[in-house]
Image: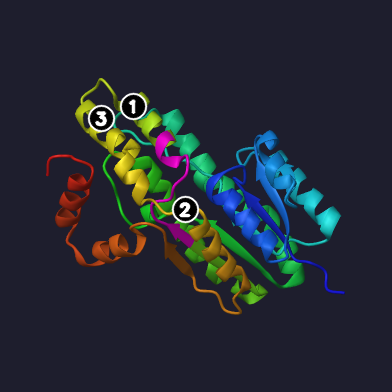
């Protein structure tokens, strides 16, 4: 009898992480869903997911989680680094403490978890590391400097890692979501208002936050399942693509970024959120 493959998904308590965990379960994986608060994972546990308390900014909690998975299943075949959030605000306004936290969660947490998982994958000479970045790892939006910085960084790190682990039979895949219907926009808007409301950038902050919260924008967003489907394709492919861009706006905006001059792209993005060009 073939032993089921094992997957670890971070940020599994909602949105993309939840949809991805359910997709991998449907593909026959033993899935561990990680989140800081496991009380939000009970619904998924009823559908076959194994809840795992994990904070990607806490080295010990990541080690404990990986040790538990290996002790219970003997393997880790897939890790989906999905945990992350959007911290928006003018570069001048965002406190250094918050900027560092954005990198700790979105970049260093993903890389550190990968470091802990890789020895187990190398021992089996197989595995897939899936890093959920964003179309925001290739484009820029007003007042999103620190967030985009984390996603650009994770894109570059993924490229380097892909070359490093290839000799061990390990794949590295980048998933670049476009606009997805999750809690992300509301959280980013809250951070934006906290950082830049009332100051020199308040007019920009109000416009961008309103755009993030608008019903018109929410209606255009894609469901998280489109990202889960992309992850499913990547982990089951014999030779997965290095990148999967999907979700509202992802492919058109990435294509425009490749062909438009910088200032023309700046003007287009400013116009999209109601800012003067």
* Side of 89 where 39 appears, left or right: right
Residue 94: percent from left, percent from top? 36, 30
| Relative vertical location of residue 206 with respect to residue 245 in this rendering, above or below | above
Mark 2 crowd level (few <14, some 14–19, many ≥20, 10 Å Cα)? some
Measured Cα–Cα span from mark 2 to mark 3: 26 Å
Identify the residue at horizontal 35%, vertical 58% (top origin).
138
Q: Quadrant of the C terminus?
A: top left
Q: Nearer the viewer, mark 2 or mark 3?
A: 2
Q: Residue furthest left?
A: 277
Measured Cα–Cα span from mark 1 to mark 3: 7 Å
Mark 1 crowd level (few <14, some 14–19, many ≥20, 10 Å Cα)? some
Which residue corresponds to mark 1? 193
Residue 211: percent from left, percent from top? 28, 39
Mark 3 crowd level (few <14, some 14–19, many ≥20, 10 Å Cα)? some
Magenta region, residue range: 175-186
Which residue corresponds to mark 3? 206
* Side of 101 where 77 appears, left or right: right
| Relative vertical location of residue 38 with respect to residue 267 in this rendering, above or below | above
Residue 215: percent from left, percent from top? 33, 40
Nearer-N-terminus badge (1/3): 1
| Relative vertical location of residue 57 with respect to residue 23 in this rendering, above or below | above
Nearer-N-terminus badge (2/1): 1
Kindly indicate whether the residue at mark 1 contacts the one at mark 2 (C-beta within 8 angstroms).
no
Question: On residue 99, which mark appears?
Answer: none
Q: Nearer the viewer, mark 2 or mark 1?
A: 2
Which residue corresponds to mark 2? 223
Choose between 23 and 32: the one closer to the eye.
23
Identify the residue at horizontal 37%, vertical 52% (top origin).
136
């Amino acid at each position: 009898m073939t032993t089921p493959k094992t997957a670890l998904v971070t940020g599994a308590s909602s949105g993309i992480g939840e949809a991805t965990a359910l997709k991998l379960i449907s593909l026959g994986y033993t899935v561990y869903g990680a989140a800081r608060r496991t009380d939000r994972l009970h619904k998924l546990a009823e559908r076959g997911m194994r809840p795992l308390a994990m904070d990607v900014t806490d080295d010990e909690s990541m080690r404990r989680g990986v040790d538990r998975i290996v002790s219970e299943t003997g393997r880790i075949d897939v890790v989906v680094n999905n945990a992350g959030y959007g911290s928006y605000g003018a570069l001048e306004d965002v406190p250094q403490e918050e900027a560092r936290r954005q990198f700790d969660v979105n970049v260093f947490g993903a890389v550190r978890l990968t470091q802990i998982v890789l020895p187990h994958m190398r021992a089996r000479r197989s595995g897939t590391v899936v890093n959920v970045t964003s179309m925001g790892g290739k484009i820029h939006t007003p007042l999103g400097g620190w967030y985009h910085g984390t996603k650009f960084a994770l894109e570059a790190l993924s490229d380097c890692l892909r070359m490093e682990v290839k000799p061990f039979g390990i794949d590295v895949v980048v998933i670049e979501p476009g606009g997805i219907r999750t809690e992300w926009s509301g959280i980013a808007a809250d951070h934006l208002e906290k950082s830049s409301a009332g100051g020199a950038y308040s007019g920009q902050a109000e416009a961008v936050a309103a755009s993030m919260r608008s019903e018109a924008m929410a209606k255009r967003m894609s469901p998280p399942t489109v990202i889960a489907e992309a992850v499913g394709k990547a982990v089951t492919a014999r030779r997965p693509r290095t990148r999967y861009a999907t979700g509202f706006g992802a492919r058109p905006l990435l294509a425009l970024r490749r062909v438009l001059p910088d200032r023309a792209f700046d003007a287009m993005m400013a116009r999209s959120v109601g800012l003067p060009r």
